[in-house]
Amino acid sequence: MPDSLRLAVGTLTIIPVGPIGEIDRWMAARAMIIAPLAVLPLALAAALVGWSASMLGLPQIMTGLLVVGALAVGTRALHVDGLADTADGLGSGWSPQRSLAIMKRGNIGPIGVVTLIVILAVQAVAFGVISHTIRGAVAGAAAICCSRAALAIVCRQGVPAARRSGLGVAVAGSVPVVAAALSWIAVIGTMVLATTLLGRWWCGLIAAALAGAAVLILVRVCLKRLGGVTGDVMGASIEIALTLLLICLAV
């Protein structure tokens, strides 16, 4: 477990974790399963940024942008980069090989740019809305942690890697299906508790259902278009799940 935790923390945050032993399939699976716990310090830090900015009287949109910026810094913008690359690859309409090549490039295309603008803008607005109270900030932190459970769905057994090399190869297909299902059940419970703090517990059920369905659809599309998933797809799944969870919290 210590190596799996270090793998999860070192991959998903900028927190230094020191050397990690040889990565095997079980270590990779455990790292993906405990991903929500690995980002807890980052989630609490983002919640603190949002609540503090709100207490200082900053406009909601400015507060939300600061939270989004803090998350980008705390994750090396890894998931945001994955979202842009995935949007460019899937939106290209080319063959799987050409689409994967587009996703591997270091630049970003127009589809990726528009996707980032829309997703990050929605996240910023939602964070700004919910961060004006301590309960809302805590609910936002819960959404950040829960969004990382998308990795268990994307990396479940039966979903292959689209490439033979890269970050996704080490973890793709490593998580048992039962563990992935239990991870999302935990998300449902957590989001219900989070939305109970805001007075609408049933919004948690809707949030978890929408986010889970969106991740499953993304995986299905990637299997059809790319033949599997990549590290970029994993990052995109996190950002998509987080956006839908935040929308429901804002409501």
Image (tube, rainbow, N blue to C red):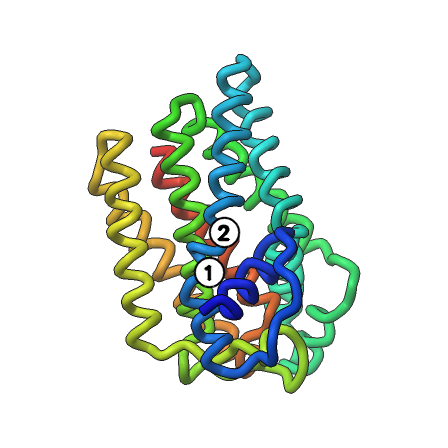
- The spot of residue 28 in percent (x, y) is 50, 75
Q: Is residue 151 above or below residue 120?
A: below
Question: Is the N terminus in the top left, top right, bottom left or bottom right quadrant?
Answer: bottom left
Q: Residue at x 35, y 40 (%)?
A: 248
- The spot of residue 148 in percent (x, y) is 46, 57
Tell how many labels.
Answer: 2
- The spot of residue 93 in percent (x, y) is 63, 72
Q: Secondary structure at mark 1?
A: helix
Q: Residue at x 64, y 52 (%)?
A: 14
Q: Disc 2 marks which amino acid?
A: Val
Residue 48 visible within the image = yes
Q: Which mark is residue 226?
A: none
Residue 220 visible within the image = no
Q: Disc 1 marks which amino acid?
A: Ala
Q: Is residue 73 above or below residue 19?
A: above
* Residue labelled with disc 1: 35
Q: Residue at x 55, y 22 (%)?
A: 53
* Residue labelled with disc 2: 39
